[in-house]
Image: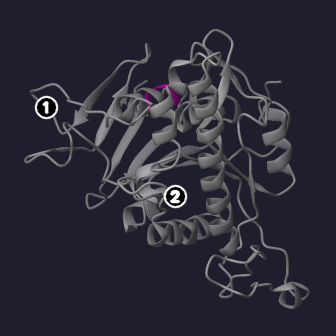
Amino acid sequence: MELNLQESGRRSIRCIVKLGGAAITCKNELEKIHDENLEIVACQLRQAMMEGSVPSKVIGMDWSKRHGSSEIACDVDVLGDQESSEFSKFVVVHGAGSFGHFQASRSGVHKGGLEKPIVKAGFVATRISVTNLNLEIVRALAREGIPTIGMSPFACGWSTSKRDVASADLSIVAKTIDSGFVPVLHGDAVLDNILGCTILSGDVIIRHLADHLKPEYVVFLTDVLGVYDRPPSEPDAVLLKEISVGQDGSWKVVNPVLEHTVDYSVAAHDTTGGMETKISEAAMIAKLGIDVYIVKAATSHSQRALSGDLRDYVPEDWLGTIISFSK
């Protein structure tokens, strides 16, 4: 079931946020979360989502034991006297980073072929890994008082046809939002009508959500300042501050003016297409008239993007990439 929240009379979604896998996990260490970054991102999200003044005390919603702790943090008594907090409507989607990519690439899940035992085993292993990460992200945001609900695309009926979204029951996402929760989706292994199975990336999920939920803006949080003209680790790499998208979906760099083509490199274990896929999906979102900000997570630049401060004016000292539609 496809659903457009604006057509159904509901208040529009303010922002869809993509937590890049490289920003929230240690990508070179198998299944290791970047705890410091995730904590800062959770705090920034809470500040961006709160309508009006931000309460000084955070009422956590993760009432389960944490690894290495023998006690449960539970603020039930405090909650009894707490007034309900108003959150603007956000949706969070996260990548896999050091979770899932290894399992998917070793087994070839992204290529399909469920009849092969290695692919079927890899499908199961990939989903175990990415859903474990999803739970930890949901818990991190819940500890900041954000009422998050983890939603796995596979379990919510998402499927593909030759890697393009074929079906997605967005009524579940819509009802979750309307009930005052923040859905947290993730890149996932899903069934494919043609290939048997594949990997549905978080970037593709965001584009599909943006098309139907029509957020005011979209923010991609990454491990670098934004989009560069070449891998940012290379000397003389240039940050692309503004990319313009045409009516046909093609895009070009408008700030700074370049005299050479943009180069991409995709990590060997990345089964979702890397930066080129990210820009292509962001361009499709921008074509809808929705500005997209690609910015380094856990920085003052990401806080400005998440809060919506850049929609009217972008200061010179802001570092990131804006992708917008050129009318």
Q: Can residue 16 be seen in this view?
A: no
In the image, residue 61 sits, relative to residue 30, either above or below, namely below
Percent of width and height locating residue 287: 49, 25
Point out which mark residue 306 bears. 2
| Residue drawn at the location 80% of the way across and 84% of the way down | 74
| Residue drawn at the location 60% of the way across and 12% of the way down | 195
Judge whether residue 285 is colored magenta: yes
Percent of width and height locating residue 224: 31, 53
Judge whether residue 237 is colored magenta: no
Point out which mark residue 28 bears. none
Residue 42 lies left or right of residue 143; in this view the side is left
Q: Main secondary structure of the magenta part?
A: helix
Locate the N terminus and report the quarter of the image it occupies: top right
Tell me how far mark 1 sits from mark 2, CA to CA. Answer: 28 Å
Task: Give the colour scheme shown.
Answer: one colour
Q: How crowded is mark 1: few (under 14 residues within 10 Å), some or many (20 or more)?
A: few
Instruction: Specify start and end residues of the magenta stretch as a single range.
Output: 282-286
| Residue drawn at the location 78% of the way across and 37% of the way down | 155
The secondary element bearing badge 2 is classed as helix
Q: Residues within 10 Å of mark 2 (few under 14, many from 20)?
A: many
**Along the line of sight, which residue is nearer the eye, 145 or 240?**
145
Q: Tell me whether the residue at label 1 lies in contact with that at label 2, contact meaning CB atoms closer than 8 angstroms.
A: no
Q: Looking at the image, how many numbered discs can be counted on the residues?
A: 2
Locate the C terminus and report the quarter of the image it occupies: top left
Quadrant housing residue 112: top right
**Along the line of sight, which residue is nearer the eye, 200 or 198?**
198
Residue under label 1: 258
User: Which circle's residue, 1 or 2, is located before the other in the chain?
Assistant: 1
Q: Which amino acid does label 2 sit on?
A: Leu
The secondary element bearing badge 1 is classed as loop
